[in-house]
């Protein structure tokens, strides 16, 4: 399936060419604020909450995320598939790139091929910190337990087929 970017206000939506919208990307221009989950939800319900200007990150991100102000960023190139997102981005200063895709611990992030922390953003989405300049962000769904289970299932199936296959009898004269 091929995807295209569509701009709507301050959001960039990654959508299929058929018109369906998929993961919206919220690039830069967001001031990070560090809150516990309950406070995050409470603040997001507030009429004053503007997701174009602020991104809520967990409290444990405060000591690791050095982005302090809103900073613009832009996507130069993007690739989307079911289990992988690749973004080439450019930022004038360090910023947070927020992907409005459900945060799940099996998604892994890399910036310029180096593993980085994927943060929970605005309670339910994903965010990655990038420094100033051009960077490649890779988000990949990596479920090693599923892969292991699949390999065990295939091996078991092959063993069953081997056991149940008709055996050729050799006769000696």
Image (tube, helix red, strand yellow):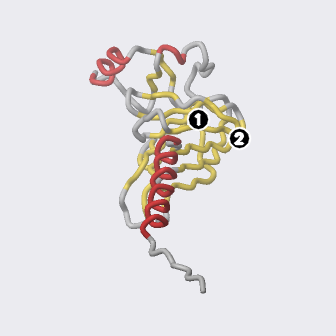
Name the foreground residue: 133 vs 78.
Answer: 78
Drawn side of residue 46 relative to residue 115, left or right: left
Q: Estimate the x, y position of residue 59 in percent, counting from the top left.
A: 48, 14
Instruction: Name above or below for residue 19 compared with residue 106.
Output: below
Give the label on residue 113, or none.
none
Q: Is residue 6 visible?
A: no
> Which mark lies nearer to you, 1 or 2?
2
Which secondary structure, mark 2? loop
The residue drawn where x is 59% and y is 35% is: 72
Q: Quadrant of the C terminus?
A: bottom right
In the rendered image, which quarter is residue 71 located in? top right
The residue drawn where x is 53% and y is 42% is: 144
Name the foreground residue: 21 vs 82.
Answer: 82
Q: Estimate the x, y position of residue 81 in percent, counting from the top left.
A: 50, 56
Instruction: Name above or below for residue 100 compared with residue 57.
Output: below
Name the residue tied to disc 2: 112
Residue at the extreme front = 173
In the rendered image, which quarter is residue 109 located in? top right
Q: Estimate the x, y position of residue 4 in percent, counting from the top left.
A: 49, 60
The residue drawn where x is 62% and y is 42% is: 137
The answer to whether the residue labelled 1 contacts the one labelled 2, judged by CB atoms less than 8 Å apart, is no
Name the foreground residue: 121 vs 31.
Answer: 121
Q: Estimate the x, y position of residue 34 in percent, counting from the top left.
A: 47, 16
Instruction: Name above or below for residue 26 compared with residue 76.
Output: above
Q: Residues within 10 Å of mark 2 (few under 14, many from 20)?
A: some
Which secondary structure, mark 1? loop
Name the residue tied to disc 1: 72
Q: Residues within 10 Å of mark 1 (few under 14, many from 20)?
A: some
Residue at the extreme bottom = 173
In the rendered image, which quarter is residue 116 located in? top right
Drawn side of residue 132 relative to residue 148, left or right: right
């Amino acid at each position: 399936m091929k995807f295209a970017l569509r701009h709507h206000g301050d959001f960039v939506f990654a959508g299929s060419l058929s018109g369906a919208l998929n993961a919206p990307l919220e690039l830069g221009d967001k001031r990070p604020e560090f809150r516990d989950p309950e406070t995050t939800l409470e603040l997001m319900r507030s009429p004053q909450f503007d997701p174009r200007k602020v991104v809520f990150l967990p409290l444990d991100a405060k000591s690791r995320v050095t982005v302090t102000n809103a900073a613009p960023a832009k996507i130069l190139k993007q690739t989307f598939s079911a289990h992988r997102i690749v973004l080439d981005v450019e930022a004038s200063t360090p910023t947070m790139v927020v992907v409005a895709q459900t945060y799940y611990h099996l998604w892994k992030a890399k910036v310029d091929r180096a593993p980085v922390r994927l943060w929970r953003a605005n309670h339910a989405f994903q965010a990655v910190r990038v420094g100033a300049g051009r960077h490649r962000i890779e988000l990949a769904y990596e479920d090693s337990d599923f892969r292991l289970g699949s390999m065990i299932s295939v091996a078991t199936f092959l063993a069953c087929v081997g056991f149940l296959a008709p055996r050729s009898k050799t006769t000696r004269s």
